[in-house]
Amino acid sequence: MGEATADEVRVQGHMISREPLIFWGPTDMPYPAGPGSSLGPFIGNRRAWFLLSPAWTREKEALVEHDIAHFAELRTLYPEHRYIVLCNTTAELENYRKRGQPAVITNAGMFTDERKYYVPKPAPKRFDAIYNATFAPYKQHHLCTDIASLGLIYHRYADLGDQAAHPEKVRAMLKHATFINELGGEFRYLSSDEIVSWLGRSHVALCLSAVEGHMQACTEYLLCGVPVVSIPNIGGRDWVLDPDYSIEAEPTPEAVAAAVQTLKARKLDPHKVRAGIIAKLKPSRIRLLQLIAAIHQEENMPLPDADWVRIFRFGFWPYKTVAELLAEQAVSETRKDIATPLANTR
C-alpha cells in the first residue's frame, strides 16, 4: 500500500498566514504537535510555524515530556519547523519554558465565538442548574445528584472504550434530570442557538470536572450570561472564572447543590456576566495577535492589514483534510473585519 494522500489525511486547524507559513491547531494524543504532526510530509522542510493549543491539560509533566520528545523527533525531520505552545495556565507555561520550549499564555477560551454565544431574550427559568458535558467519568455527573431541577446537554461518542457503560450509569443516577437532547424523542445534537436558548432558561451552569482542558462549555455559559458553579480543578477554566460570577464548591453533591442555590439567589445581571468573561478573553486574543505580529517581524515580512479577528471565528475543533487546509484562504489574506473584536452585543 502506498502512503496516504493529502485528500486522505485529516487534520485539525487552519492556516493563519501563507507568507510566512503559520498554522494553528489543537493538540491531542497521539498528535501533540497538532497540524505539525501531519503536515510535514506535505510541506517538506520549509520554514513553517505551528501555534498549538493543548486540548487536555499540560499541568501534568508526563504529558509535557511526551510533547517535548515528539517536537524533538519532528525537528530531526523538519529542522525549519517551529512549534509554539499556546498555554491555558501559568503552570503549563512554566512546564514548557523550563524545558526550553517556546510557549505563551493564550487561554483557548478565546476561540469561542462570542457572536454565536450571546445573552438570549429573557425567558422563564426551567432549571436551577444546567450541565453541558459528555457522559464520561471525568465529567463527574454524580456531583449533580442533589440538584432537584437539572438540565443536561451532552455529546455522544461512538467509541468510549472501557467507559462504554458509563452513559447508562449517568441515566440511572440522574433519573430526575431533563435530558435536553432527547426532548423531541430520539437523541439529536443541538444548534448553538438552541444551546443559547436552553442556557437562558437556567439560573446557573455547572463545571464539575477535576481535570481536563480549558472546558469550552464554561466560556459558552458565561458569554450567554449564565453564572457558573465549579469545583477545584486543573486545565484552564479558572483563567476565565471570577468570584463576581462564579462559586468554587467542594466536590461533593451537597456542596455543589448548596453553591447552586447561593449563586441563584444572587440574581446576577446576565449582561454583566458576559462583560466579565469578555474582559477575561481579551488579553489572550491580544497576546495571540502580538505573537503573529512578532513572527512576521522575525521573518522580515510586514503584517498584513487583514481580518485577524477571523482566527477567533473558526471554533476550536475544525476538522478538514490536509488538501483542504493547504488550499484554504489564509487569515492574513482576508479583508479586514469592520466589526469590533469582542462586541458586547450579539
Image (spheres, helix red, strand yellow):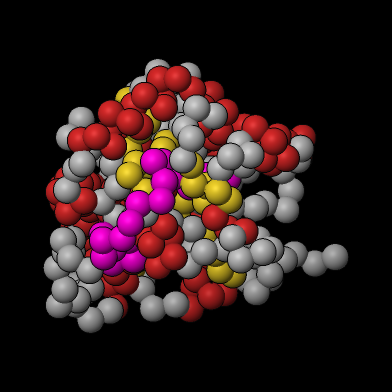
Q: Quadrant of the C terminus?
A: bottom left
Q: Residue at x 80, y 67 (%)?
A: 2
* Residue 110 counted in the magenta span: no
Q: Which residues are magenta?
A: 112-134
Q: At which x and y percent is residue 3?
A: 75, 64
* Residue 155 visible in the snapshot: yes
Q: At which x and y percent is residue 335?
A: 23, 81
Q: Residue at x 61, y 36 (%)?
A: 174
* Residue 131 counted in the magenta span: yes
* Residue 254 appears left or right of 302: right
Looking at the rendering, which quadrant does residue 246 occupy? top left
- Name of the residue lying farthest toward the right: 1
* Residue 23 visible in the snapshot: no
Q: Residue at x 34, y 26 (%)?
A: 259
Q: Quadrant of the N terminus?
A: bottom right
Q: Nearer the viewer, residue 17 or 301?
A: 17
Q: Residue at x 35, y 52 (%)?
A: 125
Q: Main secondary structure of the magenta part?
A: loop
Q: At which x and y percent is residue 143?
A: 51, 27
Q: At which x and y percent is residue 107?
A: 31, 43
* Residue 3 appears left or right of 145: right
Above or below, 193 against 240 in this view is below
